[in-house]
Image (spheres, rainbow, N blue to C red):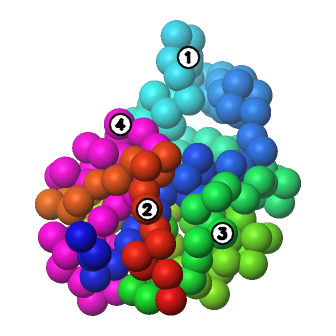
Amino acid sequence: MTHDAVIYDLDGTLVRLAVDWDAVAADVASVLRERDVNPDGRGLWDMLHLSDETGHRDAVEAAITDYERDGARDSEALPLSEGLPHGVPVGVCSLNAEVACRLALSVHDIDDHVGPVVGRDSVGSSKPDPEGLLVAADEMGVDPADAVFVGDSESDRTAARRADMDFAWASEFDQRRYRA
């Protein structure tokens, strides 16, 4: 089945950001401690949610985005990036910051083949909430039921299901039928 649009996850799907996520988590924990917030026992994404609750989202977001931006500059193109362009609209929906997504796409010269880019900071929620996918589909003028989301995580699959969108695992996606 060919869809009217393809939306890709970024990290682990089109590219692999060169980010040491343990270092990011340690840095974010320091940012929170400097603001008298105890992050002990929380993972990175839980600390991001904690920063929302405590009013420190901007500082935490800046710390994470700095790592992602650097990681985008040194990112590795993955096989699916080599299959672009497509004959249908293409978008990106990612848990990474939009600026890092755009930078990674540019570094690998695929930015001209991608329309909307929705990062965790582009909308009010993040995957597995379907909002980012719905925004990307809307910007492409495509009904979500006529699109496929290609990703590499259970969170990606859940977001697609919640958006009433088909899902394909990056490792199994046959993009040949979409090539321009």
Distance between the Cα atoms at labels 4 and 3?
Answer: 24 Å
Q: Amino acid at mark 4?
A: Glu
For the residue carrying disc 1, how many other residues have a C-alpha within 10 Å: few (<14), some (14-19), or many (20+)?
A: some
Q: Which residues are magenta?
A: 135-162
Q: Secondary structure at mark 1?
A: loop
Q: Residue at x 52, y 10 (%)?
A: 41
Which numbered circle lies on residue 82? 3
Q: Is residue 77 above or below residue 59?
A: below
Q: Does label 1 or label 2 sit earlier along the sequence?
A: 1
Percent of width and height locating residue 49: 43, 36
Q: Which residue is mark 2?
A: 174
Percent of width and height locating residue 173: 42, 57
- Residue closer to the observer: 57 or 136: 136
- Residue closer to the observer: 92 or 32: 92
Distance between the Cα atoms at labels 1 and 3?
Answer: 43 Å
Q: Which residue is mark 1?
A: 38
Q: Nearer the viewer, mark 1 or mark 2?
A: 2
- Residue closer to the observer: 151 or 178: 178
Q: Does label 2 or label 3 sit earlier along the sequence?
A: 3
Q: Secondary structure at mark 2?
A: loop
For the residue carrying disc 3, how many other residues have a C-alpha within 10 Å: few (<14), some (14-19), or many (20+)?
A: few
Within the image, what quadrant is residue 32 found in? top right
Percent of width and height locating residue 177: 40, 76
